[in-house]
Image (cartoon, rainbow, N blue to C red):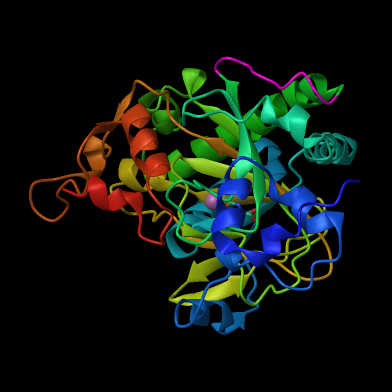
């Protein structure tokens, strides 16, 4: 593989403009980097947050088979567990979800194969606009990110209209199969979550017009990083949709904020990690908070994570469920906004740990 020009490491202004159009993977893997380019490094005091104490706490586990096939008692227990997980954590692991291990493995391989494409091949998909159906790139939004993130990504809108890059071979087939299965899991979870809020089982599905809701694949590639203490994979943020379903290769890095502390997420084998997004917070009138999370990097192995974001239909305006609002104690905490407008707002700003929800608070 061709060596990148050494100037990348010598001049930060040069490296910034070069990397805006490129991806990080080739730079990180093409030769032995011993330090990271300065535009990826947090300087003190901002870097202090990377050495925050991190806890290893058990994250709630939801057995999906009990929600779909359990006895009425088992189902009500899982609905209560789901409610508690959403209220206290905004985050849980799903087991016995019925998605085959072989399908998960093929999907991970397909995404790895995408990142392994040459830079020229990937550039074809370097979309410009947040609503472009296929978009790959580096960092989060390099035109506004003050420090670049140690991450390449591929984002593909897969529902209601299915899109797929043509390369690598097989990506289209495996991803269309994968998203169908994941959407089923999400529908079941949203039914349980609606019930846990005291709403009709299909409330969230209907209010968000889930049949034409956006389902977006976000594949993240975090190369091995020679100075993980100075870099960040994805900075603290919340997800914009209703629920995100994440799986990863066997390398950790995801952390979530729980009661003001960072917690390492160490998923059970073959489980999915599910987190609440901004639109679940809005629909639930703040009963379920959208959880803040981030991804750190490491100096031993590259990490891949696949986040499937599930949101309302883009033209649907979302507001708190009327039954969770009253004129006395539970005023609507958020203003109504179309999901499309919210997406645009979130994606065009920096991910700076501050929630985009601040823009819709009533
Ligand atoms: C995301 C995200 C976390 C991870 O893509 O929104 O939070 O572990 N990813 O990669
Ligand atoms: Ni996220």
Q: Residue at 68% of width from left, 68% of height from top?
A: 36
Image location of residue 8, percent across then percent down = 68, 58
Q: Is residue 127 above or below residue 44?
A: above
| Magenta region, residue range | 160-168
Residue plotted at (78% across, 40% down) = 115
The main secondary structure of the magenta stretch is: loop
Please give left or right for residue 171 compared with residue 200 in the image. right
In the image, residue 77 above or below residue 245: below
Q: Is residue 193 visible?
A: yes
Percent position of residue 53, x then y = 57, 85
Nearer-the-camera pick, 360 or 220: 220
158 sits left or right of 6 in the view: left
Residue 347 point in image, percent of width and height: 42, 41
Query: Does 30 lie within the magenta span?
Result: no
Query: Looking at the image, which residue is at 61% across and 40% down?
Result: 21
25 relative to 260 in the view: left or right: right
Residue 230 percent across, percent down from the top left = 61, 75
Q: Is residue 300 left or right of residue 284?
A: right
- Depth check: give the residue in front, 291 or 135: 135
Q: Residue at x 8, y 47 (%)?
A: 327
Tell me: residue 306, above or below residue 60. above
- Quarter assignment of residue 113: top right
């Amino acid at each position: 593989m061709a060596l990148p020009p050494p100037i990348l490491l010598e001049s930060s202004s040069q490296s910034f403009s070069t990397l805006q159009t490129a991806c990080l993977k080739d730079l990180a893997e093409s030769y032995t980097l011993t330090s990271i380019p300065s535009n990826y490094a947090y300087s003190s005091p901002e870097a202090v947050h990377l050495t925050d104490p991190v806890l290893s706490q058990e994250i709630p586990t939801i057995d999906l088979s009990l929600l779909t096939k359990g006895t009425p008692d088992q189902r009500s227990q899982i609905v209560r567990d789901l409610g508690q997980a959403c209220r206290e954590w905004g985050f849980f692991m799903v087991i016995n979800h019925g998605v085959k291990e072989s399908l998960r493995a093929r999907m991970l391989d397909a995404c790895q194969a995408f990142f392994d494409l040459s830079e020229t091949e990937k550039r074809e998909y370097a979309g410009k606009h947040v609503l472009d159906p296929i978009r790959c790139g580096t960092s989060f939004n390099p035109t506004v990110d003050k420090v670049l993130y140690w991450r390449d990504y591929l984002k593909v809108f897969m529902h209601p209209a299915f899109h797929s890059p043509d390369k690598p071979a097989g990506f289209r087939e495996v991803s269309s199969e994968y998203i169908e299965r994941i959407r089923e899991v999400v529908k079941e979870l949203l039914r349980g979550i609606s019930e846990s809020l005291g709403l009709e089982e299909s409330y969230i599905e209907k209010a968000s017009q889930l049949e034409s809701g956006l389902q977006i694949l976000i594949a993240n590639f975090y190369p091995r990083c020679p100075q993980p203490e100075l870099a960040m994979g994805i900075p603290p943020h919340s997800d914009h949709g209703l629920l995100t379903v994440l799986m990863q290769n066997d390398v950790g890095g995801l952390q979530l904020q729980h009661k003001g502390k960072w917690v390492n997420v160490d998923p059970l084998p073959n489980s999915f990690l599910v987190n609440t997004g901004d639109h679940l917070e809005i629909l639930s009138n703040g009963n379920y908070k959208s959880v803040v999370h981030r991804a750190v990097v490491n100096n031993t192995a590259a990490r891949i994570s696949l986040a499937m974001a599930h949101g309302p239909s883009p033209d649907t305006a979302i507001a708190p469920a009327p039954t969770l609002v009253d004129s006395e104690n539970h005023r609507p905490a958020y203003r109504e906004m179309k999901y499309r407008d919210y997406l645009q707002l979130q994606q065009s700003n920096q991910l700076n740990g501050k929630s985009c929800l601040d823009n819709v608070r009533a």
